[in-house]
Image (tube, grey):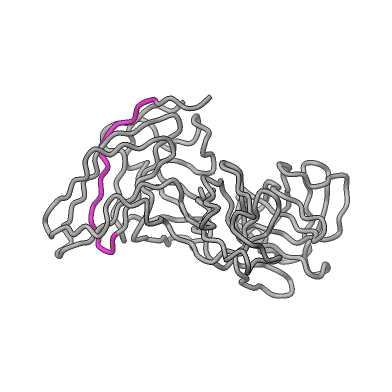
Amino acid sequence: MAVKQNGVLACFTPTVTPYVNLTTASGTSVTPNGFNFYTCPGATMMSGKLVINNATGGAATVDVAIVDQTEAIQLTAAGSQTPAGTAFSDYVFTTNSYTTSVQADVANLGGTSTFAGGETLSWTNSGLPSAYQSCTATIVYWDSSNTRLWLRNMSHPLGFELSGDTNFTSSGGGTCSAGPTYAGTGGTAGNSGRVRHYDSRRGVIYFQNYEFKNNLNYSVLYDVASEVRELNNNTPGRCFGNEHRPVATTVTRYAAAGNTTPTTEFIDSTGKELLIASVSETVAEQFILKNQSIADNSTFELNGLVLGTYQSLYITSSAAVSATLIGFEETAEVAS
């Protein structure tokens, strides 16, 4: 279990503090208005206060929320899915299970594997930087009727941006191919991650993105020995290594016949492919501060904050205010 931290746990300045991902060009970054700038680690409770200082030269408006997700993904209406459903409750996203919008249409099947969930798929992409050319992903689901693999934990999100015929091998012994020789093949630069919760009344997936880092590394979330990125109260290390590749409503599909940008689909726990309608960072019920005006050259304090395991503090503003979370972490009981 990671060492508990205290003092300044996190800091963030909207429109200034950057994040990167493996698709951003070298030397570039994204400076978002809103971000989950602190997540309470596993088996931990955090107590503290949020201090927001405004020295921007004018009044600023700030929203703060406590969230359990990196994104809230709204499914398209059940009646507009294929095949059409009757209600969002027709779909199953099991808590803490994986869901993904990464898919690969393949051909030339061989070997002995049935491409079972949990197997590792491996291939080479010589078009990527040398450190990433040996690609891997984990199989979530095999749609045998459409020869489509659904995958998570891509070693590089552009792994399917291939220049020619490519052979894939699964750890279970299966083989398949994609490329110009194989009509209809191709793959998406989608997202994968964990399901924190599925609201079956409103059709919202509360999603924990595999490609997200704040003080925690979400690619190993729920591994309490590895998820904390920086120890020894290294505040700059925790705060200035942010990474994120947000879910979008369209996804790039790479194929020899030509790249396209279809509507993003996620797969549920039973193998249903579901279109999404919108993506947001928060939902209305999660805000603890909304449209708070902070005068120039003044400080606003939000006291008495308590976060449980994997709850995150989110702030958004169009102004470059300075947000600092001051507090301490302590061991919390978790369900056995």
What count of labels does the image hold?
0
- Along the line of sight, the residue nearer the viewer: 136 or 290: 290
Name the spot of residue 174 as percent of width and height, x first: 83, 47
Question: Does 257 sit above or below residue 281?
Answer: below
Asked if the magenta segment contains residue 238, the reply would be: no
Part of the protein shown in magenta:
317-331
Nearest to the observer: residue 153 or residue 51? 51
**View extreme (front): residue:** 86
Residue 318 on the magenta segment? yes
Percent of width and height locating residue 251:
59, 66
Q: Going by the picture, which residue comes out furthest to the left?
A: 297
* Of the pair 199 and 327, the residue shown nearer to us: 199
Residue 143: x and y, percent?
77, 55
Q: Which residue is drawn at 82% across and 67% down?
A: 182
Which residue corresponds to the image point at 50% horizontal and 65% vertical from the top-left? Answer: 278
> Which residue does the image show at 32% across and 53% down from the upper left?
315
55 relative to 265 in the view: left or right: left
Residue 201 percent coordinates (x, y): 53, 55
On screen, residue 264 above or below 300 = below
Could you tell me which residue is drawn at 40 percent across and 26 percent down? Answer: 332
Q: In this view, does 106 lie above or below 196?
A: below
Please tell me which residue lies in front, 47 or 176: 47
Q: Is the magenta stretch mostly helix, strand or loop?
A: strand
